[in-house]
Amino acid sequence: MSALFRLAWASLVNRRFTVAVTVATIALSVLLLLGVERLRIEARSSFLRTVSGTDLIVGARAHPVQLLLYSVFHLGDATNNVGWDSVQRLATRDDVAWAVPISLGDSHRGYRVVGTTSDYFRHLQTADRPLAFVQGEAFDGLFDAVLGADVAAKLGYALGDSMVLAHGTAALNPHQHDDRPFKVMGILGRTGTPMDQSVFVSLQAIQAIHLNWRSGTRIGNAPAEPTAEQLQPSSVTAVFVGLRSRMATFAVQRAVNEDRNEPMTAIMPGVALQQLWSMLGLVERALQLTAACVVLAGLLGMLAALLGTLSERRREMAILRALGAGPTTVSGLLLMESLLLTVWGLLTGLLLLYVLTAALMPFVLQATGIALDLGWPAASEWRLMGWVLLSGVLVGAVPATMAYRRSLADGMMVKQ
Amino acid sequence: MTSFEQTALRLSNLRFAWPGAEPLIRVGLFELRAGERVFLAGPSGSGKSTLLGLLAGTLQPQQGEVLIAGQAVSRLSSRQRDQARADHIGVIFQQFNLLPFLSVLDNVTLACRFSKRRSARAASRDGDIESSARRLLGELGLPTETWARPASSLSVGQQQRVAAARALIGAPELILADEPTSALDVDARGDFLRLLLDECVAANTALLFVSHDRSLMDRFDRAVDLRALQNEIAA
């Protein structure tokens, strides 16, 4: 075995240029395979932890995924609102610990505005961590705003800056609530979720800036001193609900879904996120399949390189046969070479993955909110590497078998 | 009649034919005593390569027996024949004897990697196989500075000497040399042959030297013509 290993090693070192190209091909394909896998794992876990600490999300009757999309991801709009009476009924149930309503519909330079209560910052969590302010604090006055990390960073806002909200959600919007500017009171830490791209104001503020609006058009200026009654919302878009006991989740969900006063839907965010992710599963599969094909291409490159040397190495094999090596040893030599090439490719690919991960970590976090980590390969990554190794040996079996047949036929003599 | 112990090679009633062809090899009796140096002449096409394949055990005769160092190799399995070849036979080809990616020294010791027996013999004579390889390379006149170099950097004459050192290491009972001098010029040919023959005597290794260059045959104990050998049985 060790003689075989030494021979294979020396033979590969002798052909170092071809070997380097082959190893690089395998390494790059392994990098892609493992990179896709790692991104997939990270994206999935980051996605599934978009909302945590919330037991139910309640909105007007809708498909669970649709409700999730507009309430959590701020994608699309709600077809209907939830009446304030229903919010009150929900919030005062014994088994409900807290209920945080949100009101969507306005925007600021393309970023969604979320009207809510200051409880939002106390109760909502992402990735099992509560929201944290990097600067300032929750809104207090009527025209105070809290910014998500991306909004503050991209638009260059600092505490105390003033900003104007737009009516509707279009990025370039002619209808501005410029009669009621807001003041930046707080900036949230980065969460890697749609919260980073949101502007938070109080529910009352949403009411206040719409007091002088009828049918999407502004009439005069908003009243300078609106009354409490004027600021009371009549409906909200959705409600985030925390329960006193997880055990009550299904009971509350059913109660909401079967409410006779108003058609509503309650979803468990974890379940809905899982559903949404599995809808995206096809993309995931396609990515994995592509990466697997690239690995196969890499290994076929190795096959071509090994087959190419087979003719010129016929003499080499005849020499080994003359020295007493059997055809099994000769084919074992080729198998050992493909094993070495695959292992080198795997190790180089893994090294590249870590180097690249370390280099790209800050940028990926910035761009996608996905926090890459430099830990040991995950179980699924070990499994993929195992498959690559096995495929490498299987591919190597082709030239090994050919070498076996040839050396058996040639014996010590190579026919010219 | 020589005893088995003193016989390096013995062929009896050997018959071999390639599939669908007339028998190419027909040898009644052919023997090499231990340490005997024999010149085997034969024109091309007379079956020299086939005969060497039969002796080395990479080919199996349809009939008859091949005894190497008293062992009937023709009755062994192909794996056992490979082992017998590693243990008892050194081979020198016309050219391209060496693995180009190994150093000169590694090429010589490679013969011991496939045979514990030869490895042990080399070690018992010179301490270890590396020392044995160094001694042989020195005796065959290969400059010390070439020993660590890749075999491919040597001249053809030097490569043939390395091949001889590899065939001799661990003192096998028999060396099969297939036209080892035909790629060499006249001066190198003489030197090489002298060194090879001397080393065979020193190691008491029998040598079957196959060549069509009859000018060399005087330097051997005996010269045999392959065609005459074939005719013996036919007669």
Image (cartoon, coloured by chain):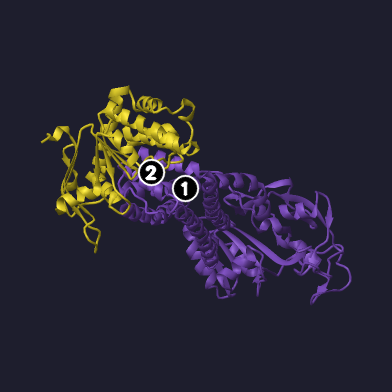
Chain colours: A purple, B yellow
Q: Is residue B213 left or right of residue B69?
A: right
Q: Respond whether the residues carrying marks 1 and 2 are from the same subunit.
A: no
Q: Is residue B5 above or below residue A311?
A: above
**Chain under numbered label 1:** A
Residue A57 location, quadrant? bottom right
Quadrant occupied by the N terminus of chain B: top left
Q: Give neighbour class at mark 2: few <14, some 14-19, many 20+ (Cα, 10 Å).
A: some
Name the chain letter of the residue that bears numbered label 2: B
> How far from the left and from the top, in percent, is residue A270?
53, 60
Q: Residue at x 49, y 48 (%)?
A: A346
Callout 2: SS? loop
Front residue (pair A382, A146): A382
Residue nearest the viewer, comparing A246 with B16:
B16
Visible residue check, residue B87: no
Q: Residue at x 63, y 47 (%)?
A: A361
What distance separates the C-alpha of mark 1 from that of mark 2? 33 Å
Q: Which residue is mark 1?
A: A341
Query: Residue at 80% of width from left, 49% of height from top?
Result: A158
- Identify the secondary structure beneath mark 1: helix
Query: Which amino acid does the dot numbered 2 rest on?
Result: Gln
Q: Amino acid at mark 1?
A: Leu
Q: Pointer 2: what residue?
A: B94
The x, y position of residue B140, in whole percent, is: 39, 28
Viewer-nearest residue: A140 or B34: B34
Q: Closest to the observer: A35 or B40?
A: B40
